[in-house]
Image (spheres, rainbow, N blue to C red):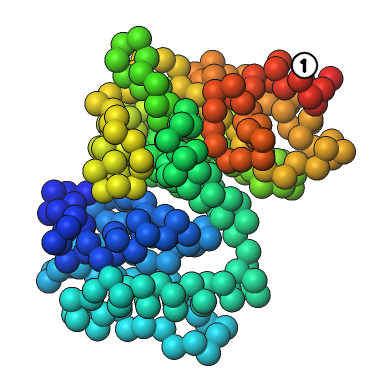
Amino acid sequence: MRALLPKFLIDLKAGGMLHPILECVQADRTLDLQIRKNNINIYYRGGNILKVRPARHGYRAEFNQNYGRKTAISLPDLKQVMKAQPSRTLWQDVFSTHKVVMDHYFVNVREKAEREFQQLIIRDNNFGKTGAVSDYSICDIEYNVNKKRISWNSSEQAKGMQFDMVAVRRHQSADGGHRLAMIEVKYGDGALEGNAGLAAHVTDMQKFLSDNALVKKLKDSMVDVYSQKIELGLIESTQATTKFSDEIPLMILILANHEPNDPRLRKALTNLPSFDKMELRVAIGSFMGYGLFDHALLTLEDLNTRVGMLY
């Protein structure tokens, strides 16, 4: 279950020892705070710039040292930072140094274009003018289903599964709940095929949504995460959700930077496996933006009619 215990939540609020970290995130839209199981991960350009978790005496802050292995930049000693009861200014200095190190890594070692794109989607749907009017709020990213929780006998599923984003449709349904949306992001046509391609993700989603216990756990967890993010000012919405509706969930495909003449997208979409546990939509841009609006979520039939992508 992804949520923060009351003490962690209080320590992130005004007057709490972790509040300066939250202030940095609130003031810097290149940073994205995600709630995990009583810890937080803060992302920058799709990479984890800071992890904070409870320790025996207070909290422990961590940074992935691999980002700095090919630079001569001296990294902050996070143990000493935490002991110093750091201010917002000190945390800003920490983030600034980490950013330089990560920028170098993403340019010279390994790019994370897909995850960086995810972060832009979060920014536009959770914050600012677009976030105030878009039809979806992003609750979570990289939602993992532990292999021990999976009851299917399939070697394909032995590694578990991961979903790029979990979202809430902001408009209340007839039963007073909100519709669940699972989002899969593919950056470039090379990501459409293979073991992590579209067909594999549709298969994963169909199996996941067929397990009522797993779906209930996800919904219960996202109710807490969504409410806590609103409480912390991480989603600009005044309407939390107390439950998800019984509607069939949406699976939204976000296919970034498709090259129109590349046949792989047409092939991937026409060869999807059968499914009945979700409603599939393909997101198109709202005049080149990242906002998710219902009118720009197309069925496969709509996609064929409007852009002639399928034959």
Residue at 49 percent across and 87 percent down: it is: 73
Q: Quadrant of residue 97?
A: bottom left
Horizontal side, residue 113 vs residue 43: left or right: right
Q: Nearer the viewer, residue 30 or 128?
A: 128
Give the x, y percent position of residue 307: 79, 24
Q: Nearer the viewer, residue 196 or 261?
A: 261
Give the x, y percent position of residue 83: 18, 80
Q: Is residue 145 above or below residue 84?
A: above
Horizontal side, residue 175 vs residue 58: left or right: right
**Mark 1 residue element:** helix
Give the x, y percent position of residue 310: 80, 23
In this view, the residue farthest toward the front is 129
Horizontal side, residue 275 vs residue 63: left or right: right
In the rendered image, is residue 206 in sight? Answer: no
Give the x, y percent position of residue 51: 34, 64
In the rendered image, is residue 28 in sight? Answer: yes
Label 1, residues with CA under 10 Å away: few <14, some 14-19, many ≥20: few
Residue pointed to by mark 1:
305
Q: Is residue 69 above or below residue 292?
A: below
